[in-house]
Image (cartoon, rainbow, N blue to C red):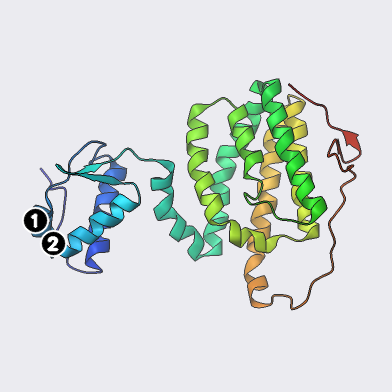
Amino acid sequence: MEPLFRPIREGKLSEAVEDQVRVLIYEGRLKPGDRLPPERELAATFRISRAAVREALKRLEATGFIVTRKRGSFVCPLTPAALANPLEEMLCSEFARIEQFIEMRKSIEAVSAAEAAQKATAEDLGKIQGALRELLEAIQTGRLLEDGGLAFHLAIVEAAHNPSLLHVFQTCATLMRSTQGITNLTRDAATGRENYVGHEAIYRAIRARDPVQARERMLSHLDAAKRAIHSLNPLLHRRPTSDRGDGPSQVGIDRSGAEVSGERMEHHG
């Protein structure tokens, strides 16, 4: 039988230990509740110092992969935060990889939008509408939402009433928050309007119970987000030195947020 752990011959020792344990957890060879070998035994197996093993175990515990008790270190059930943490560094290292992340979101959120169009309750529609109104108010006042509009997307996934999609999206949500500072660099009055119109179109398709349009509108919206990220690299090298002078945009809606693009939003629930 192949041993779980392999001796470490190169790289930063503690990081190599951490990587091996993470891979074993991802592959299911280490399962929730499994106890890791004692620190002394791990050090002998990896052929490194106990100090390096101890450092790796501390990081694994800090990121939610293991928990240390008096009887030893035990594997934890994987959470969205634990799944997202190693991906977070990858996504933030290169803008191209954020584009890849958006492609992953498309596969999840397009299905969610289509299912929401078929399954959303009046209460669900009210939550989506409320998140849409919050986006509008942010545009009108020229501010950036702290969550970047995440509440709108979460409301749609919840409206799909599909626990599997919701679980996967919760991992995506962690990654979305981690890259929000980068995506905010793409925001100005024009992109704010485009972003809002994209969200509005998704809401209208879901409200109209049109799964095909809901799916297409979501894909179109995420494609626009991908284009904005793609354009970011040149912007980082030539940031404007003065304000562009764009004031808060108006999208044909009164201050109550009750109308969208000249049409009145229906209240649900």
Determine whether, in the image, residue 108 is placed left or right of residue 234. left
Of residues 91 and 139, the one nearer the viewer is: 139
Q: Which mark is residue 198?
A: none
Of residues 102 and 242, the one nearer the viewer is: 242
Q: Provide the residue designation for mark 2.
A: 50
Query: Which three-letter amino acid code belongs to the residue tagged 2?
Result: Arg
Report if the CB atoms under discs 1 and 2 are less than 8 Å apart.
Answer: yes
> Based on the displayed image, in which of its 4 quarters is residue 87 positioned?
bottom left
Where residue 23 appears, as percent x and y from the top left, is 29, 49
Query: Which three-letter amino acid code belongs to the residue tagged 1?
Result: Arg
Q: Provide the residue designation for mark 1.
A: 40
Of residues 23 and 138, the one nearer the viewer is: 138
* Sequence-first disc among 1 and 2: 1
Measuring 10% from the left and 63% from the top, which residue is drawn there?
A: 47
Element assignment for label 2: helix
Determine whether, in the image, residue 141 is placed left or right of residue 76. right
